Image: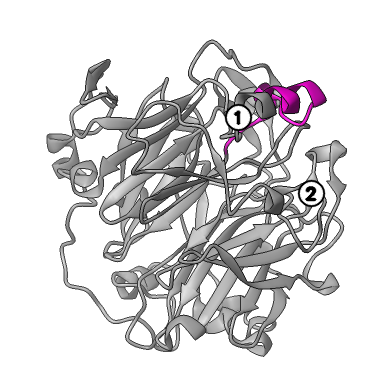
Amino acid sequence: MLRELLFVTFLHLGSCSVDGFQKFGTQIGQAPLLERFFWRTMDFAYPDEGSRKLAMMKGDYVPENALPVGIEIWRNKLFVTIPRWRNGIPATLNYISLDANRGGSPKLTPYPNWAQNKAGACGSAITTAYRIHADVCDRLWVLDTGTIGIGNTTIQACPYTLNVFDLTTDKILRQYRLKAEDINMNTFIANIAVDLGKGGCEDAFAYMSDELGYGLIVYSWEQNKSWRITHSYFMPDPLAGDYNIGGLNFQWGEEGIFGMSLSPISVSGYRTLFFHPLSSRREFAVSTRILRDEKLSQDSYHEFQVLSERGQLGHCTASVMDENGLQFFNLIDQNAVGCWNSALPYAPENHAVIARHDEAMIFPADVKVNRGMLWIMSDRMPVFLLSTLNYSDVNFRVLTVPVRDAIAGTVCESSPWAVLPCCGSNEVRSRGWQRLQVSL
């Protein structure tokens, strides 16, 4: 901790423009955030202006109703998802060409096309997508919740369906409809993690977190089969349901298992899944050896591990872990992103805030790592849902910072001991986990 205090300086540099990009000096951390893209309202790449005006006149496109919540990067594409929480969302799964757009406020192009983004076209289009994942096999994993609306306005227009695209051809490789026993009357799934094992592209599992139904749905690509896991660790902490974000105080006390991240693969062929309820300040973990085995997953309560709390301002949305075992997590109470080097025990003294900005990072909703670059989506979600956004202001941003620069001088930069092999009787030991287990 002393080392971190010596090297991490507290500053606010304001903002400046460099090579056409906006740069924000973070209020904590050494590396400036690069504002790659920004929007006051989201716009779409209609074939022509006449089509756009017609969509607006018919109510098919209402600019103020679109809130971006998820991002993913694949080669020259930045994917952006917009759920159909309100009317007037023409496409839920979209992308931006990174070749054609260096910055600014680019219009979104529906992926793979307009027709496959038609609301309520069950089996042939995606109604609502949240967070998505592109794997190393050039596949895009998209769970269509099939819902229109949010909260009491929700309509289940189509069944929950997992869609997997071939990104090299933009064609659907597989659609899998979740079984009735995979969900319940409260189900709301907004996150997906994809686990590739030593067996290559066929050895793939998807983990989908049921935030309001308090479950984890596992899908096996090879078996083309799914199953549901329940555990008390998926539930919210009743003491962590109060939030203060964007000048608003509100209560989201029902929010259970939300963000997930996967460790690098261990010598045994398994990973560790880290997860947390949204209304919680604590992280949990389990070996994918448990999750991948349908029978074992139903009777392995004690294989799930409890980690330390992140601290009082520790509500977290999305998280991601890179190939080096560095976890990054969005700290929504702090308008910030934190990091943890998994070579160290999971504890507040081994966490660092690597970026924070009280304007540009109000409600960081998603975070990704791609080729050494950290990508952050901020969207002011609570203001959108509970108050009114100022549409003359910038509301939505995609920010980037190199991982190496972000962690420089922090406790996340290096580990005090070598990488340790995972597994044994308790397999949830990624790198420093063997030391961590002693304190559990």
Read off the residue under disc 1: 48
Image quadrant holding the C terminus, namely bottom left
| 10 relative to 304, above or below | above
| 378 relative to 20, above or below | below
Q: Amino acid at mark 1?
A: Asp
Residue in view at x 80 percent, y 65 percent: 183
Out of 239 and 39, give the one closest to the viewer. 39
Indicate which label's residue lies in the foreground, 2 or 1. 1
Callout 2: helix, strand or loop?
strand
- Residue 64 at least partly seen: yes
Out of 405 and 143, give the one closest to the viewer. 143
Q: Position of residue 250 (x, y in %)?
A: 67, 27
Q: Is residue 371 left or right of residue 110?
A: left
Label 2 close to label 1 by CB (< 8 Å): no
Q: Position of residue 164 (x, y in %)?
A: 59, 68
How many neighbours does mark 1 have within 10 angstroms: few (below 14), some (14-19), or many (20 or more)?
Answer: few
Image quadrant holding the N terminus, namely top left
Residue farthest to the top?
392
Q: Amino acid at mark 2?
A: Thr
Q: Is residue 19 magenta?
A: no
Q: How is colour applied across the structure in the image?
A: one colour
- Sequence-wise, the earlier of marks 2 and 1 is 1
Q: Position of residue 29 (x, y in %)?
A: 24, 33
Number of the label disc, if any, that sits on residue 147: 2
Instruction: State which region is magenta.
Output: 53-68
Residue in view at x 76 percent, y 70 percent: 178
